[in-house]
Image (cartoon, rainbow, N blue to C red):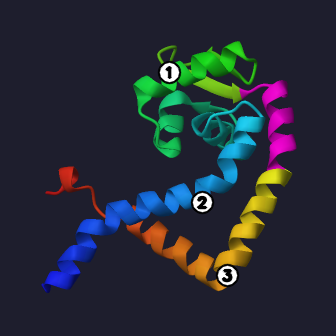
Amino acid sequence: MSQQTSLHQHRLPQHLLSAREAVMSYFRPMLNSFNLTEQQWRIMRLLDDRGDMEAGVIAGLACILPPSLTGILVRMEKTGLIHRSKDTVDTRRLIISLSAKGSELTRQILPVSARYYEQIEQHFGADKLEQLLTLLTELEQIPDPQQAD
C-alpha cells in the first residue's frame, strides 16, 4: 500500500462528515424554520414513508442511538408530532406513528425539501449524484468488523 493510499484511507471519515455538512447546510435552516431537529425530521420521514414502526427499527434506520431516540420521541409526542403505543402482541415493544399534526407538517416540508435536493442535483450533476448514491449504498453494506467470524 502506498503512502498516498494510506493517507486517503485515513481521511475517509472526515470526507464523509464534511460532505454531510455540505448537504445539511441546505436543510438545517429550513428545519429550524419549522422548529425541527435533523433527528426529528429523519423520524418523521421514516414514518411517512413506511408507516407505523417499532422504536428499535426507527433507531437503526434513522441512525439514532436507542437512548437518544427515547428522549427525542418523548419530546415529539409532547409537541403532538407522533403517537407512542404499546404493541398489542408484545407489550415490551413501543410502536410509533405519525400524528395528524406530524403528517401535515411533513406535507408542508416535503416540497421545500425537494427544491433543495434539486439544487444539490443541479450543482453536483444528476449522473454524479446517482453514482455517489450507488457508491454510498455499497459502502453501507461493508461487513461490520465486530461481526467478523
Residue at 23% in and 67% down: 10
Q: Residues within 10 Å of mark 3 (few under 14, many from 20)?
A: few
Q: Which dot marks residue 125?
A: 3
First of labels 1, 2 by sequence position: 2
Q: Type of residue at label 2?
A: Val
Q: Type of residue at label 3?
A: Gly
**Element type at mark 3:** loop
Q: Which dot marks residue 108?
A: none
Image position, residue 91 (x, y; %): 52, 14
Q: Is residue 66 above or below residue 7?
A: above
Q: Which dot marks residue 70?
A: 1
**Element type at mark 2:** helix
In this picture, residue 15 sits left or right of residue 39:
left
Residue 108 in magenta stretch: yes
**Element type at mark 1:** helix
Q: Residue beneath label 2, please?
A: 23
Give the magenta-colored segment's residue range. Answer: 98-110
First of labels 1, 3 by sequence position: 1
